Image: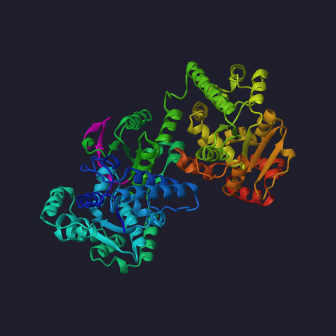
Amino acid sequence: MKKLVIITGMHRSGTSLTARISQCMGAYLGEDNELIGSSLGNPDGHFENIEAVCINNNILQLCDRQWYSLESPEVDYQSLQIRKSMDNIKAVVRKLMEKNNIAVIKDPRISVLLPLWEKALKGLGIEVFYIWVYRNPLEVMESLRERNGYSSKYGLLLWIHYNLSILRFVKGKEYLLINYRDILEQSSLIKKLSAMFCCKCDDDLTMKIHSIIKQGYCHFDYSYQDVKYTQNSLLSGLYGALLEKREAKADVSLWEKYYKTALNEAEGKFLDYEILENVSVLEGKEIIIYGAGNYGLLAANMLQQLGFPEYNFCDKDIHKHGMNFMNGIVFSIAEIENRENLLIIVAIENEDIRKEMEQTLAYIKGVNFLSFFVLEEIYHYRAEHPTSLMSETEKIYAWYKELENRAEIVRDACQSPVLVYQNGKVGSSTISKSLWNVGVENAHVHRFFFKNDIVGELILGEEQKKFISSSNFFNFQYSEYVMNVKKEMKCKKMITLVREPIAVDLSTVFQWIGSRTSSRYFAQKFRRGESFCQIVSELMVKVQNRMFDWFDEELKELCGIDVFLYSFDKEKGYTIISDKGVEILLLKVEKLSGLAEVIRDFIGIEQFELLNENVGKNKRYAHLYRDIKEKIELPKEYVEHYYSNNQYMDHFYTKEEQKIFLSRWKGIVK
């Protein structure tokens, strides 16, 4: 029977070296162009199948995880995307097995996806064997700190997570446990591996293996006693069990309980709201800008303009350590980990890397954060000559860029058979992306007619209403445009949505904050002495009822449908309107997770599933948004407008639903 060997283990633990040795012994990993090549961290190569790594990354993303996540992925095996990924795993393995009776797949990510891989490989008629490579956790931690810039505590937690995940899976299964040190020092291990790969262990093989095993592979040297000195009983207990090969008898559930407790010990707290309201909170903090690059330079310039010239940097690039940069010194992670009163600004352009670093640095003791996004906002709002207070020319330019964007949306809408047409901030991005994912072309549209152009007012100022109206061709006043839009939208399927209105209003304001549409507005208000919470509250009142008005100003204007004349199933959370030559699916966002089949049938496709998109926790302003939800004070009249016999609310939501919604906001009503 053909054999597949899966090499598992935490990153930086010797899995690449083990895979290279298996290749020397005749196992097939793939052609050279099918494997990930060398890098600074792995100069001799990673020996990872490119397709397998891409599949694993995709699965982790579908589960809202990354390779560095400390939480296990929760896999939905009913998901179309997950099932497709499992089919892709089968295809990769079949391709390997066609070339050799013994194949190897190595990717540390498999360590946290082992149950999924086991399910995917069932029925292939091959024998699957597991190699588990482990290494001293302190050595792994040092390697991660040097290569990735991870804090010590985070690196150790990641080591525990990966090895606990493997242990949980291999219980009762046949596997080979390998200590990284044994690869470097024990020839007896070579005999075990050669037997697994049905390879004769002669002098030629031994010399070949010894030629690729370099003591230089081990840049750090820690003992078991060093691990004990950490006084981390979970860490030393798990590592000791592996060293003594008694892991099979371990109480995994108890260790997992300890691990979950350790996860809650993240120290990092974002002070975005506190510093935005009172910049003097920065006084007395040791400010560290993480990232000694272009964004670090921008952060330093903004701090100087705000009156905080004392700061230093941190960067994972060892070539920058110790250098002077923008009047600060560049430190390594090791040099800042034990300092007190730290405030870190992660100044990295790539959003994914920024989130990674914020997550991994959060386990430094006593650390606080200020997001780069909020630092920019503070600079725009409070600096002596903020760039956000644009000249007249700059404002006009920004306005015409907005009009250009509107033109592109209208063009896309004319060419698409399906419209996801709604007010905005109601979960529409999820539906649009999910439709595209199954090949359904659609246009994501918020407005065609802009009867109340608040975006224009935020960009140009309320005093420019006349100019806004006359310069905007995409306007209900232009009869030819209105006539053409109505003509082009006939016979299209439309999906529209409704959501709890206060959440919509707050999200709308933050959308403008995030896109910098409202920077000028906020800067002017700040200079008049208003707080950030006050300004957000004012804007929410300004957009009150915007979502419900949208049905008249947009949908009714476009196709003559008044949704409030049609019954809405509050329990099921949707209705389908087929009238006046149009088909409209009207959904309630709070029920959306259970409406995939309704959307599938409405569009007329065989398969459809919802993929989360535009998730609030992933946005640049996520921490500020969370704090504002807790601290903002909303006028009583504003809240009562929605929750005191509001005909629109009564049309879509039961009294019980409204009661639940209201309870979420009652604590912040003035």
Question: What percent of the width, then of the height, locates residue 596?
Answer: 67, 54
Q: Name the quadrant containing residue 194.
A: bottom left
All told, the count of numbered labels is 0
Residue at image x 66%, y 45%? 428
Q: Name the quadrant containing residue 590.
A: bottom right
Compare residues 268 and 354 and report the one nearer the observer: 354
Query: Would you say residue 67 is visible in this rendering?
Result: no
**Residue 233, placed above or below residue 604:** below
Does the segment drawn in magenta span residue 323? yes
Residue at image x 25%, y 60%? 26
Q: Is residue 531 left or right of residue 119?
A: right
Q: Is residue 298 left or right of residue 550?
A: left
Q: Quadrant of the N terminus?
A: bottom left
Q: Is residue 512 left or right of residue 575?
A: left
Residue at image x 18%, y 56%? 212
Compare residues 287 and 439 and report the one nearer the observer: 439
**Residue 252, placed above or below residue 402:** below
Which range of residues does the magenta coloring cover? 321-340
Residue at image x 58%, y 30%? 520
Question: What percent of the width, then of the height, locates residue 111?
Answer: 40, 63
Question: What percent of the width, then of the height, locates residue 565?
Answer: 87, 45
Compare residues 456 and 415 and report the one nearer the observer: 415
Tell me which colouring the rendered structure shows. rainbow
Compare residues 64 and 133 and report the one nearer the observer: 133
Query: Would you say residue 664 is visible in this rendering?
Result: yes
Question: What percent of the width, then of the height, locates residue 18?
Answer: 27, 61
Does the segment drawn in magenta span residue 385? no
Identify the residue at the far right of this view.
565
**Residue 306, placed above or below residue 358:** above
Q: Is residue 118 left or right of residue 326?
A: right
